[in-house]
Image (cartoon, rainbow, N blue to C red):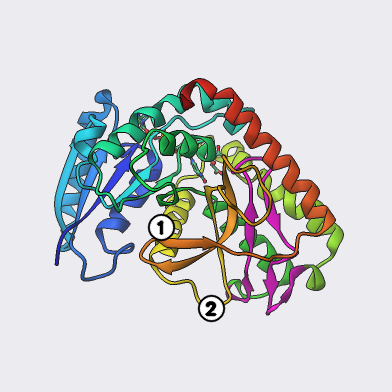
Amino acid sequence: MNLKRIAITGAAGQIAYSLLFRLASGDLLGPHQPIALHLLDLPPFEEALKGVRMELEDSVFPLLKEIKIGSQPEALFEGVHYAFLIGAKPRGPGMERKDLLADNGKIFVEQGKALNRSASPDVRVLVVGNPCNTNCLIAMHHAPDLPRNHFHAMTRLDQNRGLFQLAKKANVDLREVTHLAIWGNHSATQVPDFHNAKIHGAPADKKLDRKWLETEFISTIQQRGAAVIAARGKSSAASAAQAALGAMKALLEPTPHGEWFSSAVYSKSNPYGIDENLVFSFPCRSKGRGDFEIVQGLAIDAFLKEKLALTEKELIEERDLVRGLLK
Ligand code: NAD
Ligand code: LMR
């Protein structure tokens, strides 16, 4: 079987430390697919990458055939089929994710260009580094030869957080909560869609108190990243790695009939009237092998509509802030 090449940026960081060993054990591509890991970090972290490589070697993963490490994006992205763009500064207490744009935005100019020049033309890219939606917009802008629908920003963690809170409140098994879409930005304006979510196959707002859903539920998900930072002193890592795996896997496997998952994707020609030049989280359905469509025709009630307008506005403002990086 041909090797599949997976790039991970920020490979000396904390999310990568939770993700790499799972990739190497076949959690993404299954127990028969040999893989190569391409680990990218900044030059001062090359020594740390050597340590990560030693640990990967010492874990004797039979599927892991090759490990490349380095700090040159173009060299490290050579021929990659999957790219997890994690490398970026995390926020600290009291910051919003968009406060990172000035520092992190430019990383995605360089990495978009490098992907364009050296990745496999069918590469699928998941941007995790914050603010991930706008960073993803920047990366795709600088990769004009790659299809824009090969780029995603991660809202899977928000989806997972929402599933947990709904299951807990309804006192049901996690598997009974389905169809939870996150709309918009991976930020405090994101919209966890309780109206179209289902508990035991019925709309969540028929099973749970609407007032709780509109207030406590939404704000818990919007603020969950900040709550983790306040408690841990560092941003989420293992749950982010779990979400990154889930997000990429959801693209590769056909979505079961009638279901959907959340991913922030290029908004061109979207069926919900959202500005057409954003990376916006929508309910998506995969046809397998990385091809997906935005789910059409979901009911958008007045409450949801108002919230969608706020998250769209925030993404437009972020885009305005990085105008200089989108030339
Ligand atoms: P971390 O500080 O532990 O690791 C980040 C790593 O990225 C560091 O090793 C750093 O040297 C590296 N890096 C920085 N610039 C780089 C560049 N230009 N090229 C390659 N590597 C570079 O941080 P972390 O906890 O792993 O978080 C990484 C990012 O992911 C942060 O921006 C964080 O906010 C974001 N995040 C997003 C989500 C999400 O749901 N989308 C969830 C959690 C964290
Ligand atoms: C998260 O949602 O946990 C991450 O985006 C980290 C953060 O800054 O909140």
Q: What residue do we see at 16% from left, 47% from top? A: 67
Amino acid at pointer 2: His
Q: Is mark 2 within 8 Å of ligand 1?
A: no
Which tag, 1 or 2, sits closer to the chain's start?
1
Residue 163, x across and y down, in percent: 62, 63
Q: Is residue 307 above or below residue 97?
A: below
Q: Which residues are magenta?
A: 175-204
Q: Position of residue 109 (x, y in %)?
A: 39, 28
Which-is-in-front pick, marks 1 and 2?
2
Between 293 and 97, the one lying in front of the other is 293
Residue bearing mark 2: 257
CA separation, marks 1 and 2? 18 Å
Q: Which secondary structure lies at badge 2?
A: loop
Above or below residue 272? Residue 288 is below
The question of residue 191 being in magenta is answered with yes
- Image-quadrant location for residue 200: bottom right
Quadrant containing ligand 1: top left
Of the pair 164 and 203, the residue shown nearer to us: 203
Q: Which residue is mark 1?
A: 248
Q: Looking at the picture, how far across and down is residue 93, in whole percent? A: 60, 29
Q: Is residue 42 left or right of residue 88?
A: left
